[in-house]
Image (spheres, helix red, strand yellow):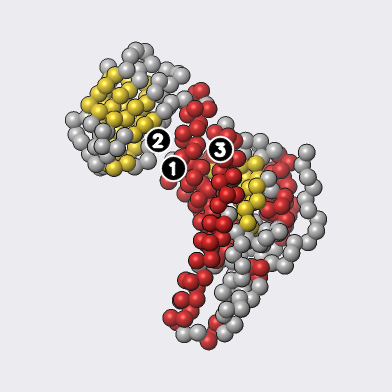
Amino acid sequence: MMQPMPSTAPPPLSTEAADARHPQLDRYDTPQLVAAFVDDQTGAVAAVQAAGPDLARAVDAALPRIAAGGRLIYIGAGTSGRLGVLDCVELNPTFSWPRDRAQALMAGGDSAMYAAVEGAEDDGPQGSADLHRLGPTENDVVLLIAASGATPYVLGALQAARASGALTIAIANNPGSPLAAFAEIGITLETGAEVISGSTRLKAGTAQKIALNTFSSALMPRIRWNCWKMNPKVRRRVSVRKRSGRLVISRPSTNTLPEVGLAMAPMMLSSVVLPDPLGPLKTVTLRASTSRLTSSMAVNSSGRLRLKIFVMCFSSTIIAS
């Protein structure tokens, strides 16, 4: 049963406090300013390291839902929203993740990516409505990002996400925030005061970026492995052995081989072992060797198994007949 949203006011925001180390920031010369801003970023790394166990728990909780066909949905406002959009859009070029399975919502809409939309982050009902528009399901994973942990737009989306049964993962920078408390998994990146008071695009934003990078980059390899074992339609195992250059794909459960996505691997590809749904395993050998395999796709066409390998700046088609 879903618990009600905490009604108590959040504790004072550490991200809004003045940084006692730099009371005369406006009097610094340029080297001092650069040193102050760069050195402060180390606090972002430390905050994410401290939250490592919670990040790992979030990845493991998201895994079965995404493997079952769910989406990653990012929600935020201001800097936090823009960082969510950034992680969202980079999943496709980095991991070939389907674009329709990564969505991002930002307070104020698309125009808020380029200019602040005053008051948008304070509209809780709009956050709820925006998420409802995406039709969240219990297989979806909703990432809610807010430095304060109390942004009304994000809290409104959180309520809608919890009501839909989606997994909710909160990322905030202030301890004791309602966002982290009400989400199923709350990740607090305690970065403290900023060199420029309240400017959470600095250390807090850096910590959020590291956390989002870590979450999605850790999730994708786990999905690629586990979805093959969990989904009978795409059950297969891919093993790339460096140096030996053998690509092994176990027999799929259907007569059509689905797309096989591989990360770039420095290797010498000498031979390929292919499962023929209509017969025993076939072995074919590439005549041209290469040091980099960029992508691979196997399909069944006219009763013949075809492996198309794109290598460097040219492509070769190998047919196992």
Q: Residues within 10 Å of mark 2 (few under 14, many from 20)?
A: some
Q: x%, y% of residue 216? A: 51, 46
- Judged from the image, the secondary structure of the residue bearing numbered disc 3 is helix
* Spot occupied by residue 15 in the image (x, y as percentages of width and height): 64, 68
Q: In the displayed structure, would residue 83 be above or below residue 166?
A: below
- Point 53% across, 48% down: residue: 215
Amino acid type, callout 2: Gly
Q: Is residue 25 above or below residue 106?
A: below
Q: Name the residue tied to disc 2.
A: 261
Instruction: Identify the secondary structure beneath mark 1.
Output: helix
Counting residues from the start of the chain, the first of labels 3 and 2 encountered is 3
Residue 259, by quadrant, is top left
The answer for how far apart the CA atoms under marks 1 and 2 are is: 8 Å
As displayed, is residue 78 above or below residue 223? below
Spatial distance from mark 1 to mark 3, Cα to Cα?
15 Å
Q: Which residue is mark 1?
A: 95
Instruction: Indicate which disc residue 63 carries.
Output: 3
Seen at 62% across and 45% down, the residue is 142
Foreground mark, 3 or 2?
A: 3
Is the residue marked by circle 3 packed among few (<14), some (14-19), or many (20+) residues within 10 Å? some
- Residue appearing at x 53%, y 66% in the figure: 43
> Which quarter of the rendered picture does the N terminus lie within?
top right
Q: Give neighbour class at mark 1: few <14, some 14-19, many 20+ (Cα, 10 Å).
A: some
- In the image, taking residue 296 as reference, residue 104 lies left or right, namely right
Q: Position of residue 22 (x, y in %)?
A: 57, 80
Contact, mark 1 vs mark 2 (Cβ under 8 Å): yes
Quadrant of the frame with the C terminus: top left
| Amino acid at pointer 1 | Phe
Residue toward you, 315 or 293:
293
Pick the residue in front: 130 or 318. Answer: 318
Residue at the outermost left position = 287
